[in-house]
Image (tube, grey):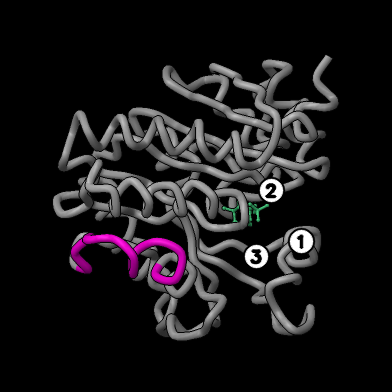
Amino acid sequence: MKLIVVKDYEEMSLKASLIIKELLMRKKDATLGLATGSSPIGIYQNLIKYYQNKEISFKDVKTYNLDEYCELPRSHPESYYSFMHRNLFSSIDILEENVHIPCSEGSDLQALCKEYNDLLHQADIDLQLLGIGANGHIGFNEPNTPFTQETWVVKLTEKTRLDNQRFFNSLDEVPTHAMTMGIKNIMQAKCLLLVASGKNKALAIKRLASGEVSEECPATILNNHPNAIVIVDEEAASLIK
Ligand code: GLP
């Protein structure tokens, strides 16, 4: 695992977006695994700029998102479907048929999980972008998720619901469940690119940087990936000795 410490959110976003730009310049039909949350927003803004400057195109790019809330219609402003369209897809030339986001609307969630998992088996993701939860979760794989887990429906921990409450009017409105790629799916990407900023990520980053590999802190699985890059700002790195 390659750990890069930078000054702040802006520099983290720049470094990460240059890695993605370089991939898209080299491989015009790359497949990207994408993430939501506040961490990747700066990266998406940079990618939009590169697209507008005609440095890259998404015409032949395919994307697969990590996760989606259950119980929220796709049209809800806080669904990850809406998030991705608002923050990236509506500003680039990606084809809607090349965009894949777990669909958690419907009565048979198990069938929807299997459908997304089957898609992932064929996806061959070149680069998977990841944020990290304060408790070390990746996607929505909470602590103690087996590393062998594939796409599934997760009951969110209270910590994660509280962390994500800021996007909703109240805690009651935060969904209790989500559908997420499993750790096994995430590990199948050729390259993993994790970004983290801010003090509330420092403990999880400390565990990741220690070389530990433990299901108690899901992100530590990156230590077992042959090509994982972790870009963190000074605050997120503040507990690394
Ligand atoms: C959510 C998402 C994760 C994300 C995490 C951190 O729980 N499911 O994919 O990494 O939040 O979010 P943020 O980047 O806003 O701190």
Residue at horizontal 38 percent and vertical 48 percent from the top: 47
Q: Is residue 90 magenta?
A: yes
Rounded to the nearest angstrom, the CA distance separating label 2 from label 1 is: 8 Å
Real-space Cα separation, disc 3 to disc 1, in angstroms: 15 Å
- Name the residue type under label 1: Asp
Residue type at the position of mark 3: Lys
* Discs 2, 1 touching: Cβ within 8 Å: yes
Tell me the crowding category of disc 2: few under 14, some 14 to 19, or many 20 or more residues within 10 angstroms, Cα based. Answer: many
Q: Nearer the viewer, mark 2 or mark 3?
A: 2
Marks 2/3: CA–CA distance = 15 Å
Looking at the rendered structure, the number of numbered marks drawn on it comes to: 3
Q: Is residue 186 left or right of residue 207?
A: left
Give the left or right position of residue 171, taking residue 196 as reference: right
Question: Which of marks 3 and 2 precedes in the sequence?
Answer: 2
Q: Earlier in the sequence, mark 2 or mark 1?
A: 2
Say whether mark 1 is within 8 Å of ligand 1: yes
Q: Secondary structure at mark 3?
A: strand
Q: Quadrant of the N terminus?
A: top right
Give the residue pinned by disc 2.
133
> Nearer the N terminus, badge 3 or badge 1?
3
Tell me if 89 is positioned left or right of 1 in this view.
Answer: left
Give me the disc on residue 180: none
Residue 155's label in the rendered image is 3
Amino acid type, callout 2: Gly
- Which region of the structure is painted magenta? 85-96
